[in-house]
């Protein structure tokens, strides 16, 4: 353990002088900050002051983090796509929300193949039976020039009734 012995308590003389200089020139500093940020500095100060004066909720605050039901997902059309990280997903075109993770395109022994999202293929949870049944034949489908990713996503969309 180290004990530090100081000759005086409180702020150093240099710190007190710097604080006095800043307070004496507060208007000029604020003006320059507004010029540099195009008014953003004063706007952020006003927003913080308004947030502090806003009424605070008493008691418990409840946030519902559960996923929305299918009826409120969106009014768009369901689509299937292969993402940049080789995941095959069904999503709602209107809201952009993912409906299902259908599977993944994997590589093994120089071949690319479609692995359906099942527990047997290493996914944490499988697909619902109404989605799994039409796609079961596509598990292990080789992805090459004869069957590119676009053809696979079109076939999945057709089998699920999204096309």
Image: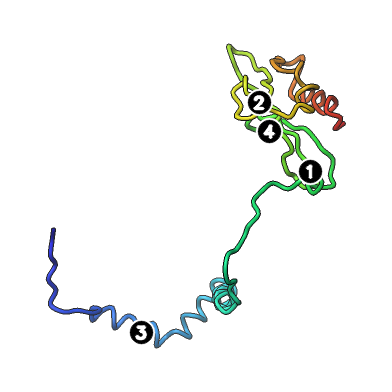
**Residue at the top extreme of this rendering:** 109
First-in-chain label (2 vs 4): 4
Identified at 72% across, 15% down, the residue is 141
Q: Does 146 appear above or below 86?
A: above
**Marking on residue 83:** 4
Residue 1 place in picture, x, y as percent: 13, 58
Circles 1, 2 touching at the beta carbon (< 8 Å) = no
Say which quarter of the image contains residue 47.
bottom right
Q: Which residue is mark 2?
A: 104
Q: What is the distance, in whole Å, between disc 4 and disc 3 at their CAs?
A: 57 Å
Circles 1, 3 touching at the beta carbon (< 8 Å) = no
Q: Which residue is mark 1?
A: 70
- The nearer-to-camera label among 4 and 3 is 4
Front in this rendered view, residue 124 or 25: 124
Circles 2, 4 touching at the beta carbon (< 8 Å) = no
Circles 4, 1 touching at the beta carbon (< 8 Å) = no
Residue 67 place in picture, x, y as percent: 69, 46
């Amino acid at each position: 353990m180290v004990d530090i012995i100081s000759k005086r308590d409180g702020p150093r003389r240099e710190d007190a002088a710097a604080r006095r200089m800043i307070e004496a020139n507060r208007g000029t500093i604020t003006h320059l900050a507004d010029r540099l940020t195009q008014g953003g500095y004063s706007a952020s100060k006003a927003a913080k002051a308004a947030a502090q004066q806003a009424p605070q909720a008493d008691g418990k605050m409840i946030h519902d983090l559960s996923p929305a039901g299918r009826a409120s997902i969106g009014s768009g059309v369901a689509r299937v796509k292969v993402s940049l990280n080789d995941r095959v997903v069904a999503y709602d075109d209107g809201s952009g929300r993912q409906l299902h993770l259908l599977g993944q395109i994997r590589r093994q022994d120089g071949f690319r193949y479609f692995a359906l999202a099942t527990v047997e293929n290493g996914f944490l949870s499988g697909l619902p039976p109404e989605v799994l049944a039409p796609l079961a034949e596509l598990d292990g489908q080789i992805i090459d020039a004869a069957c590119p990713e676009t053809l696979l996503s079109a076939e999945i969309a057709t089998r699920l009734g999204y096309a």
